[in-house]
């Protein structure tokens, strides 16, 4: 399969017109650094540190931070924390509508192309493994358009019910899908309904040369960090944020479909759960999510793992990045 790159002269072309020419075999692929790992592991801080060191820009790989207004609930990086480093793929979608992995891939590729055209280093940072793999592996996604009537029907159901529906359609894929992710389940049902099953994703020729740095730590340390981070967000007004989103037209049903924090906040604010159990149950769910993230990433033997609680972690990351970029 041919590799491609976009001429820098495209910036002088009329808006929307892009010229692509074959990439000669002797030319190297563009280099992209990827920072990944479970939630609360310190990915954001490391990505900004590397961006400052190597003249980089950050491309978020978080399936919920793409939505406008989902700020405290997703732990979105603040302007102050960005320290002047440009960030991409934040606040690009309407939370009332599903933002697909195909849309993410298209937007992220465009962002990386822009970063490279400015002579800077793209740093992909996030914990959504499916987004990261699809972007850096050149994964070919099933060409199945949204089925709006089916989606409307499925969005009334919770994750366990959706999983049972999908299990009947594709029992093989059901053994590997995240059965707690309503958005992923609805899309899988949509694809299986159209094609008979969810086809195995095909990896094309990876478009980039990548350095993948993973952050992780011991269970008890990560659990404590999850609780501390959650407590901080609640104090800053996470529930108020959810209430504001609902008042602006985001239904409780759609909020639940956004998962984790927003599912629990929707239940609390709509009277389906009690405040006294809110934080404890949510922290437990976030921990389970972190475990699923670990399972996803552990399959990739190319990831270099670092423990952010160790004093040398950032220094080691800088060393790996420096060597990678000099190659």
Image (cartoon, rainbow, N blue to C red):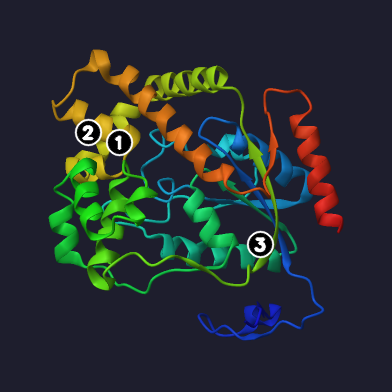
Q: Residue furthest front?
A: 172
Mark 1, secondary structure of its residue: helix
Mark 2, secondary structure of its residue: helix
Q: Which of disc 1 and disc 3 is earlier in sequence?
A: 3
Residue 289, x across and y down, in percent:
42, 34
Look at 57% across and 72% down and name the residue there: 204
Q: Which of disc 2 and disc 3 is earlier in sequence?
A: 3
- Describe residue 10's horizontal placement relative to residue 241 as left or right: right
Q: Is residue 95 something one can see in this rendering?
A: no
- Residue 41 picture quarter: top right
Task: Name the foreground residue: 255 vs 80.
Answer: 255
Task: Give the labeled residue for mark 1.
Answer: 262
Dividing the image into 4 quarters, which one contains the C terminus?
bottom right
Look at 61% across and 40% down and name the residue there: 82
Task: Name the foreground residue: 205 vs 270.
Answer: 205
Residue 219, x across and y down, in percent:
54, 22
- Residue 138 picture quarter: bottom right
Task: Name the foreground residue: 124 vs 296.
Answer: 296
Near mark 1 (Cα within 10 A), the count class, few <14, some 14-19 or many ≥20, is many
Q: Is residue 229 something one can see in this rendering?
A: yes
Task: Give the labeled residue for mark 2.
Answer: 266
Question: Alpha-carbon distance for marks 3 and 1?
Answer: 32 Å
Dividing the image into 4 quarters, which one contains the N terminus?
bottom right
Look at 64% across and 69% down and name the residue there: 207
Number of the front mark, 3 or 2: 2
Task: Give the labeled residue for mark 3.
Answer: 115
Near mark 2 (Cα within 10 A), the count class, few <14, some 14-19 or many ≥20, is many
Relative height, residue 239 to residue 65 (above, below): above
């Amino acid at each position: 399969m041919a590799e491609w790159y976009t001429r820098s002269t495209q910036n002088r072309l009329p808006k929307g017109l892009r010229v692509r020419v074959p990439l000669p075999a002797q030319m190297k692929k563009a280099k992209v650094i990827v920072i990944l790992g479970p939630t609360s592991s310190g990915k954001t801080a490391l990505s900004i540190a590397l961006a400052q060191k190597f003249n980089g820009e950050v491309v978020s790989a978080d399936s919920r931070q793409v939505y406008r207004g989902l700020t405290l609930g997703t732990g979105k990086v603040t302007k102050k924390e960005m320290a002047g480093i440009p960030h991409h793929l934040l606040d690009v979608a309407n939370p009332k509508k599903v933002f697909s992995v195909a849309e993410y891939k298209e937007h992220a590729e465009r962002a990386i192309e822009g970063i490279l055209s400015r002579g800077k280093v793209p740093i992909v940072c996030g914990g959504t493994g499916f987004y990261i793999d699809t972007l850096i592996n050149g994964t070919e996604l099933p060409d199945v358009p949204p089925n709006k009537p089916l989606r409307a029907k499925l969005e009334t159901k919770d994750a366990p019910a959706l999983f049972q529906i999908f299990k009947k359609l594709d029992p093989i894929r059901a053994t590997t899908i995240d059965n707690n992710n309503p958005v992923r389940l609805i899309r899988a049902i949509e694809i299986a309904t159209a094609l008979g099953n969810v086809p195995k994703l095909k990896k094309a020729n990876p478009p980039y040369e990548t350095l993948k740095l993973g952050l992780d730590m011991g269970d008890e340390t990560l659990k404590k960090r999850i609780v501390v981070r959650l407590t901080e967000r609640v104090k800053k007004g996470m529930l108020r944020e959810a209430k504001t989103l609902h008042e602006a037209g985001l239904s409780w049903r759609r909020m639940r479909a956004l998962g984790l924090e927003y599912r629990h906040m929707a239940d609390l604010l709509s009277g389906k759960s009690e405040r006294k159990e809110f934080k404890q149950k949510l922290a437990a769910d976030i921990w389970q999510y972190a475990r699923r993230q670990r399972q996803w990433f552990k399959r990739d033997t190319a990831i270099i793992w670092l423990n952010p609680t160790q004093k040398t972690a950032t220094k080691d990351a800088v060393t790996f990045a420096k060597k990678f970029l000099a190659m």
